[in-house]
Image (tube, rainbow, N blue to C red):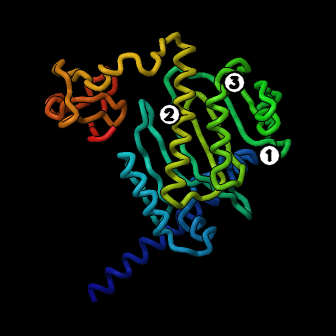
Amino acid sequence: MELLVIFVIIFVVYGAGWIWQTVNDTLRDIRRSNWDSRVYGQIASARSVRRSLGGQDLGRLRQAFQRFAELHDGQMHDRQLFESPKVSFSYQASRGLLSIYQSSGPAPQFYTQLTFTVPQGWNHRLEIFPQRFRDDDVRYMNIDDIRVGDDVFDPRYVVKSDDESFAREFLDVPTRRVVEDLRNIKGNDKILISLNASRLMVRKHSILGELSDLTAFAELSCRVYDRLVSSFQRASGIEIVEEGVGAEAADDPVCQVCGVAVPRDGRVYCRRCRTPHHKDCWEFNGQCSTYACGEKRFSYRY
């Protein structure tokens, strides 16, 4: 009898959760604008992802996301009843979130997406996507498509920004190469790179369910973030030291707590800003020693 009562309680809880999620998704879709539903979408539910995969169980997808979290010292977020898996992790001084999004409508489209927080003080907007998008998708900012002066890149992409000079500077040769590599993942051409004052978003059409695809997508997205930080540093007047300068010192960093060099054995890194510490010094200090960082978790790997 007790087992039956427990079973009924579990059934009621899961049933109520399913009903709540369905009603919430419906109301959210009603409130969305046409642009939001086609471009920004919503976090994909486990139910919709499973349906898009032909009814397959999401075990392999969750395993890939879990392995990605382990490799990046991240945290897996898996509300199996309500949402598809997500992974949050630290990269440089930013927080990243890997997730699956979907557009609303009778035939939703699915995207793998990685978002980053951007440096404080950033104020530019930028959108990059292939020319194959429809005309009404490329005019929402009421700004003409920006040309960067590349006879191969310009015909293939739409570039929108509130600052043409920034867009051209940001989209230098290395950045254009990364954009092209992102477009070539899975060979479906569809990508969206969106930047504003609160986040950098890189989105790829399709559900990337293999660890190798997730890793390639994340590495390329991180390179876009690196290019953003480089642009921000130049605009802020921060000197960028070329690679190779001070390399010997970089191999033997100094702990900011005790002021003594940190050997590789026993070294830990802040999970937010990657500053190296002695493990003992981290435990003594209780958090990262970098001013205003405040991170309390460390990693053994950089």
Counting residues from the N terminus, which is met first, the one under dot 2 or under dot 1?
2
Q: Is residue 156 above or below residue 144?
A: below
What residue is rendered at 56% in x and 54% in y?
A: 100
Which quarter of the rendered picture does the C terminus lie within? Answer: top left
Answer left or right for 157 relative to 254. right
248 vs 270, nearest the viewer: 248
Q: Is residue 293 above or below residue 271?
A: above
Residue type at tag 3: Ala
Mark toward the viewer: 2 or 1: 1
**Which secondary structure, mark 2?**
strand
Judged from this view, the residue extending furthest toward the top is: 237
Instruction: Identify residue for label 2.
Output: 117
What residue is rendered at 57% in x and 48% in y?
A: 113
Residue type at tag 1: Phe
Which quarter of the rendered picture does the N terminus lie within? Answer: bottom left
Mark toward the viewer: 3 or 2: 3
For marks 3 and 2, give the CA distance: 19 Å
Q: Which mark is residue 167?
A: 3
x and y, in percent, of residue 195 in the image: 62, 32
What residue is rendered at 65% in x and 35% in y?
A: 177
**Which secondary structure, mark 3?**
helix
**Which secondary structure, mark 1?**
loop
